[in-house]
Amino acid sequence: MWPIVGLAFGTVLALAGAFGGVGAFLLVLVLGALGFLAGRAYAGEIDLAEMFTRRT
């Protein structure tokens, strides 16, 4: 499944870069990465609270 997801994401990035320029490419890249992290957190694969809490 992950190769297909990677292919789809790469295609979207390529289209954003071709038709929207560098700004659209970067926006799609950042939002895609945030969506990936949110999806993994929702599935329970990573713990975002652990990343953002202070350790004393």
Image: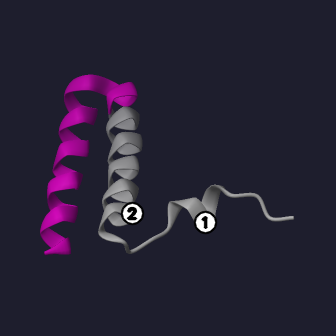
Horizontal side of residue 55 vs 53, given as left or right:
right
Instruction: Name the main secondary structure of what is drawn in magenta.
Output: helix
Image quarter hosting the C terminus: bottom right
Report the residue at 32% width, 38% height from top: 28
- The residue that disc 2 covers is 41
Residue 19 lies in quadrant: top left
Disc on res. 38: none
The residues tagged by marks 2 and 1 sit, at their Cα atoms, a distance apart of 11 Å
Q: Nearer the viewer, residue 44 or 3?
A: 44
Horizontal side of residue 42 vs 9, given as left or right:
right
Three-letter code for the amino acid on which mark 2 is drawn: Ala
Residue 38 lies in quadrant: bottom left
Report the residue at 20% width, 73% height from top: 2
The answer to the question of whether label 2 and label 1 lie on touching residues, with beta carbons closer than 8 A, is no
Element on which disc 1 rests: helix
State the colouring used for the structure image: one colour
* Relative to 46, residue 39 above or below: above
Which residues fall within the magenta stretch? 1-24
Element on which disc 2 rests: helix
Q: Position of residue 47 (x, y in %)?
A: 50, 68
Residue 18 among magenta residues:
yes
Q: Position of residue 9 (x, y in %)?
A: 22, 53
Image quarter hosting the N terminus: bottom left
Residue 32 among magenta residues:
no
Horizontal side of residue 45 vs 7, given as left or right:
right
- The residue that disc 1 covers is 50
Q: Earlier in the sequence, mark 2 or mark 1?
A: 2
* Relative to 40, residue 11 above or below: above
Sort mark 2 into few (<14), some (14-19) or many (20+) by Cα contacts within 10 Å: some
